[in-house]
Amino acid sequence: MVSALLRTWLLVAPFTVSAALVALVVMIPVTWAMRDIRPIYQVARWLVRAVLWVAGVRVETRGPDPWQALQPAVYLSNHVSNVDPPIVFLHVPRVAIMGKKVVFRTPLFGYALKMAEFISVDRRAPDSRRKAMEAGVDRLKRGLSLLIFP
C-alpha cells in the first residue's frame, strides 16, 4: 500500500503533470493552426497510455471486443474510480465526452476539451443539462459518438 502511494506521488503525478503541460503547450497551437482536433486527440491517447503504464495499470477485456459499436454511438460508463475515464477514453473511437463544468475551468486542459467539442454540464443548473443534451444530439447528428459517465 505504501509503495503504491509513493509511486503515485513520486512518479505518476509528476510525470502526468509535466507530460500534460508539454503536450498542451505544444499541441494546442498545432491543433488551432490546423483546425483539426485529430493531432491533439492522438497525443492525448498516447499520454493516457503512458500515464497508465507508469502507474502500473493493465487493462484486460474478455469476450467479444466490447469497444466496437455502430457509429455514432452513446457510450455509458460507471465511474468507480478516477482510472475509469482514461481507460474508456483509450478504447472507444473518437468521442465527445460530457463532463462536469469544473473540469472545463482548468487552464489549457479546459481549452483543449472545448477544442475537442467535449460538452460541459453544470449539474446545479437544470438549463445546463438541457443544453448539454442538445449539444449531445448535435454531435451525434454530425457523426461523433458520446461518452457519458452518469
Image (cartoon, grey):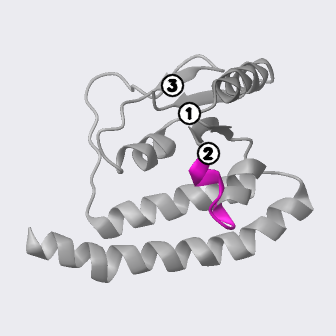
Number of numbered discs overlaid on the protein picture: 3
Circles 2 and 1, Cβ within 8 Å, touching? The answer is: yes
Location of residue 71 by image quarter = top right
| Mark 2 / mark 3, whichever is N-terminal | 3
Q: What is the span of residues highlighted in magenta in the rendered image?
A: 101-109
**Residue 75's mark?**
3
Mark 1 Cα shell of 10 Å, populated few (<14), some (14-19), many (≥20): few
Q: In which quarter of the image is the C terminus?
A: top left
Q: Is residue 148 magenta?
A: no
Q: Nearer the viewer, residue 72 or 146?
A: 146
Dot 2 corresponds to which residue? 101
Mark 3 Cα shell of 10 Å, populated few (<14), some (14-19), many (≥20): some
Instruction: Name the amino acid type tagged 2.
Output: Lys
Instruction: Name the amino acid type tagged 3.
Output: Tyr
Give the Cα distance between marks 2 and 1. 8 Å
The residue located at (68%, 41%) in the rendering is 118
The residue lying furthest to the left in this view is 1
